[in-house]
Amino acid sequence: MTRFLVSLLAGVLVIAGAWVGWTRPGSVDELIARTADRAVEPSGAPIGMGHEPRGSRTARTGAPVTPPPAAGSPLRPARGAAIDPRGTDPGRACSVPAPTDARGMDALFAQLDGEPRLQGGDHGGSVRLADGRTMFVFGDTIRDTDVVSPFMVRNSVLVSNGGCLRAMRAGDDGAVIPDEGDTGYWPMSLRARAVSGGTRVEVITAAVRDLGGRDFETVGSGLATFDVPTNRMPKLVSHEPLTPTTADPTVPTWGAAMWESGSWTYVFGTASNADKTTDGWALHVARVPSSHLADPSRWQYWDGSGWVSGRPDDQPAQAGRLIGPDDGVSHVLGVVEDDGSWYAISKEGDFTGDSLTVWKAPTVTGPWTAHPVRDLESTSRTLRYTPLPHPDLRMGSGKLLVSWSESPTTSGPYHRDPSLYRPRFTEVDLP
């Protein structure tokens, strides 16, 4: 059965439907009804934000990059030519201090009211740049059609400098990673490297094929490379396929999370069963020498007992599950390593679940144990999904910063108030 976004009934938010359809089969209205039957708004506003897990060691980002400490040490250097700043826009100068808690992060993202190219979006993974700024990548993005069109594009990029934001401008004012025919691209995980003249950022994307009407299917992963000159805006350098094309939901979508440890980059994939009837996704892992991320022939896959080489489609779908699909993780998630332990941060049971959950393991191959850390329930009015860690952003509390995506379930509020379709932030302690 292909992985697809199902037809939406009238009045259901297009973007919420896209994300739900990607991760769940069946009618979006059916899912909304299920959540409405037991909807309880979580108490209290989101509070806090974290940085390095446990606040004592140098942590790598959820998209693996070693963030500089307060003194600003460089990122891991990358090979390759120096970054050419030609063709890039200047960054936004800023004298406003960076937020130091989650409420400050929520306030920072309120600046999107003044960003016509990025009024709202979901996902919002982040990575620290060599010059101290932070780059965010978003999936489906809504814009101010008084200034740019179309209303929605598949992806966008945002750069924060201290307490200021600026959206990346695409050459045609469309998606920053352009569609190719009937296929668009959702960012999943990312990493960064310091190079002469700035930062090179690699983003693993999910290819999303338009089936007509409001139906879609995800058909593989790609690798987009951005060059970010010092104090200037990013530019897209390349975007190439990373895995074979397939719409089989039992084949892991590689790049759902990524993390570096030693000389390896660990790439995590998520998969369902043939009917996509599980409340969540199974988690799988591959590894590749860090300098060979773009070469799948160098990847090794955990098959449940050892690391084996081969193309992604050569690996049995049922082998090497770190976490099972029943009450499993979201389709896109974050993984971090800290103090000898591994942590997967996600929503248990995906859209139908109630909890932001941290799975902990002594090694990357497990065993993984679930630890719910706070309520994160969807309601009859709001879908809450795709929690992501941001250890690249340091906060005063020393806790781990986690964002999640929110989307209204009806189109009226979504068109009237783009702020309803933006990340929300909280802080969590790792178990």
Image (cartoon, grey):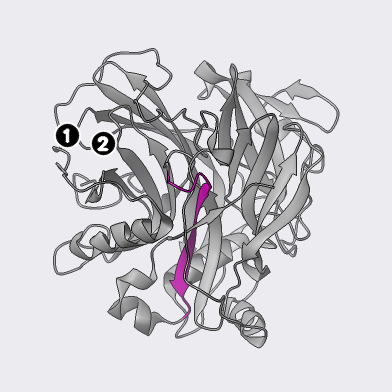
Name which residue type carries label 2.
Pro
Q: Secondary structure at mark 2?
A: loop
Percent from the top left, x then y, of residue 386?
Answer: 55, 57
Residue at image location 35% in from the left, 21% down from the top: 194
Is residue 397 part of the magenta span, yes or no? yes
Q: Which residue is mark 2?
A: 234
Q: Nearer the viewer, residue 116 or 310?
A: 116
Tag 1 near tag 2, CB within 8 Å: yes
Residue 114 can be seen in this image: yes
Percent from the top left, x then y, of residue 163?
Answer: 25, 49
Q: Nearer the viewer, residue 279 or 253?
A: 279
- The answer to whether residue 14 is left or right of residue 173 is right
Rendered image: mark on residue 147? none
Q: Which residues are magenta?
A: 395-409
Local packing at callout 2 (Cα closer than 10 Å; few below 14, some 14-19, many 20+) is: many
Q: Is residue 280 above or below residue 157?
A: below
| SS assignment for the magenta stretch, majority | strand
Percent from the top left, x then y, of residue 256?
Answer: 58, 44
Percent from the top left, x then y, of residue 229?
Answer: 23, 27
Q: Is residue 234 above or below residue 121?
A: above
- The answer to whether residue 413 is left or right of residue 84 is right
Rendered image: mark on residue 88? 1
Residue at image location 69% in from the left, 47% down from the top: 431
Quarter of the figure with the N terminus: bottom right
Of label 1 and label 2, which has the lower sequence position? 1
Q: Quadrant of residue 377?
A: bottom right
Q: Nearer the viewer, residue 209 or 166?
A: 166
- Distance of label 1 from label 2 (alpha carbons): 7 Å
Name which residue type carries label 1.
Thr
Looking at the image, which residue sits at the far right? 305
